[in-house]
Image (cartoon, helix red, strand yellow):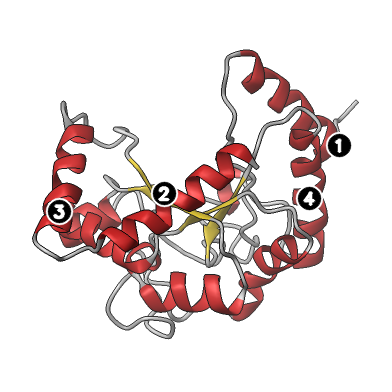
Amino acid sequence: MSRSPGQAGQQIAETLDSVGVTLNLAPVVDLNVNPTNPIIGSLGRSFSADPAVVTAQAEAFIEGHRAVGVRTTLKHFPGHGSSTGDTHLGVVDVTDTWSPIELEPFANIVRDGLADAVLTAHVFNATLDPEHPATLSPPTITGILRHQVGWDGVVISDDMQMGAIRDAYGYADAVRLAILAGVDVLTIAQQQVYEPGIVETTIDLIEGFVRDGTLSEARIDESYARIQALKIG
């Protein structure tokens, strides 16, 4: 017998809770716009091409987690489902394939009060920002996600070591741009390449940016407040 998204969500949450994990970087709420998408559609990671179905399935999955006390993360904002490339490997341009309908599951779940955190995509969309991919884009994160969608909670980056970011921008610039764009938590997954000391390096970079005025203490305080609210909420 197949499990419903709510049942699956609760069982996953119970496993996570049993080992002390309190935040799941799921569910994927990308629309299955391109079924041959190498990182979403072809891997069966999307609930549907219909935003109403994605919303309903994702919300059931989230409710299953909430029943256990585990929080969830909507990804990959503003939508990775129409892409034809893999951001793990390099720059992925969705300018000609992305459409505003891909925002709907995010907006619906935020509106329904079921969002805990949102994780960004590394996709580039010149219509939304002609210079930077979503993770590094103030118009996308601060403009669309925070102002248009109305999300004021934690924003998490996708893996900062992925090719779409590191190869194109360099790690130090990517860290700086992500925080300026509105990212609160930087994901460092060590899945593409293992770099000893990368966490310490990242902390040193952020401290340096604050010292030289590139980042303000107030900007760091904003992220700290959101993270603390997520932890105690």
The residue that disc 4 covers is 59
| Label 1 residue SS | loop
Q: Is residue 50 visible?
A: no
Distance from disc 1 to disc 3, alpha carbons, whole Å, reads 43 Å
Crowd around label 2: few <14 · some 14–19 · many ≥20 (10 Å): some
The residue located at (53%, 71%) in the rendering is 146
| Label 3 residue SS | helix
Distance from disc 2 to disc 4, alpha carbons, whole Å, reads 27 Å
* 161 sits to left or right of 205: right
* 38 sits to left or right of 113: left
Closer to the camera in the image, 142 or 54: 142
The residue that disc 2 covers is 224
The residue located at (64%, 45%) in the rendering is 27
Which percent across, then down, holds residue 171? 17, 51
Closer to the camera in the image, 81 or 52: 52
Which percent across, then down, holds residue 101? 66, 76
| Label 4 residue SS | helix
**Mark 3 or mark 4, which is nearer the start of the sequence?**
4
Q: Is residue 112 visible?
A: yes
In front of the other: label 2 or label 4?
Answer: 2
The residue located at (46%, 81%) in the rendering is 96
Distance from disc 3 to disc 2, alpha carbons, whole Å, reads 21 Å
